[in-house]
Image (cartoon, rainbow, N blue to C red):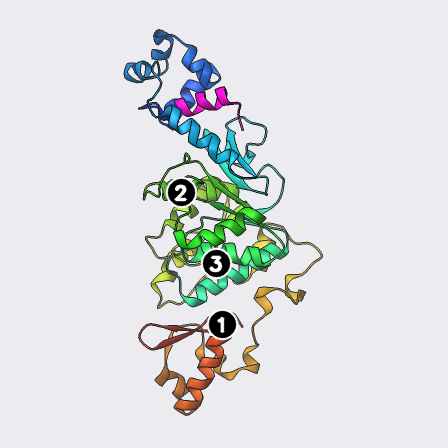
Amino acid sequence: MPPPDELAAWLRLLLTPGAGPEAARRLLAAFGSPQAVFDQGSAALRQVVPAALAAALKTAPPQLEGQLAATTAWQAGGANREVLALGDPGYPAALLAIEDPPLLLYTMGTLKLDAPAPALAMVGSRNPTPQGASNARAFARSFSERGITVVSGLALGIDAAAHEGALAGPGSTVAVVGTGLDRVYPKQHLELAHRIAERGLIVSEFAIGTPAMAHHFPRRNRLIAALGDGTLVVEAALQSGSLITARLATEQGKDVFAVPGSIHSAQSRGCHALIRQGAKLVESAQDVLEELRWNDSKSIANNPDSALTSGQNDSENALLEALGHDPVGLDALQARTGLPTDALLARLLELELAGQVGRLPGGLFQRTVSV
């Protein structure tokens, strides 16, 4: 964390009306540090930024004192809390490579972003199908078992499943959030956020006290893409924010991967669109490992603990085979299996309790494991 005077200067620069990220970077490029910016005369400032902003820089914002107090109190309120300024030794190199790195980065957790370790961004729908959520957990756990850090956004749905899967393995996970780190959004992820902070890292560019605001979440997506060596989209609708992350990853020169799904599911159309645009189709974690050259002597396929190999084989379970991969109704299942209604419902309940089948609206069922 920068010394108090230095932190105050960074916060003052960020809080000055009109001093957005672009203007702040121009000022830093011209004068070297926030304090040096405030040491300049008005004429020198007007050479770099408009006159209105040059004038605003000569007066400390009224909220500066409160923001500085809140930030220092947050940092002192627990272990493993840091504020990293642009240019600090611990500032992640992956973020320095993007066009608009955060001037201040808030982190909470035990993982160090400057450590050289492979990482994969995983994103997807906030309203996934049971199959999609299951795939996300399984993929993330397999990556975790290989020592690959899973990066996501702590949102509902695929993000949460990716974090959970990573924590189920021996590896770690990073959550990039759209609020200040004194808040958890959504609130139902409070316990998950605590576990991530214990085993991994929570990251934000937003000041302490910042609430959840809609325009913050697309902005944080560039950090998710930047912190991963590639981006895997597990399930996404055509208008999903996950496609923003995929686009940003492409612009950053990163590989984009997509898991195909049912042609009948709106939650698969985003992935199918990405594949048409050149994203790499992924059917297993091994596909990603091979493409990014992360393979070693340990084989996921031969790992008995791998989440992607834990399901039953189709040949051993006729009902799972009859379910296929698309949502299906009871009448169609009866026609495929020939089972009486009572026996079919009983078997479906067993599979549902075992986490292998999900019950969808409209009396439909869908397999939630890859077999």
Task: State the mark number for residue 161.
Answer: 3
Residue at x-position 45% and y-position 67%: 131
**Amino acid residing under circle 3:** Ala
Q: How many marks?
A: 3
Q: Is residue 10 magenta?
A: yes
Residue at x-position 45% and y-position 22%: 8
Residue count near mark 2 (Cα–Cα under 10 Å), binned few <14, some 14–19, many ≥20: many
- Dot 1 corresponds to which residue? 355
Q: Is residue 165 magenta?
A: no
User: Label 2, label 1: how many angstroms apart (C-alpha)?
Assistant: 31 Å
- Dot 2 corresponds to which residue? 178
Residue in front for this viewpoint, 64 or 13 = 64
Residue at x-position 43% and y-position 56%: 275
- Residue 232 visible somewhere in the drawing: no
Q: How would you classify the magenta stretch by its main secondary structure?
A: helix
Task: State the mark number for residue 97.
Answer: none
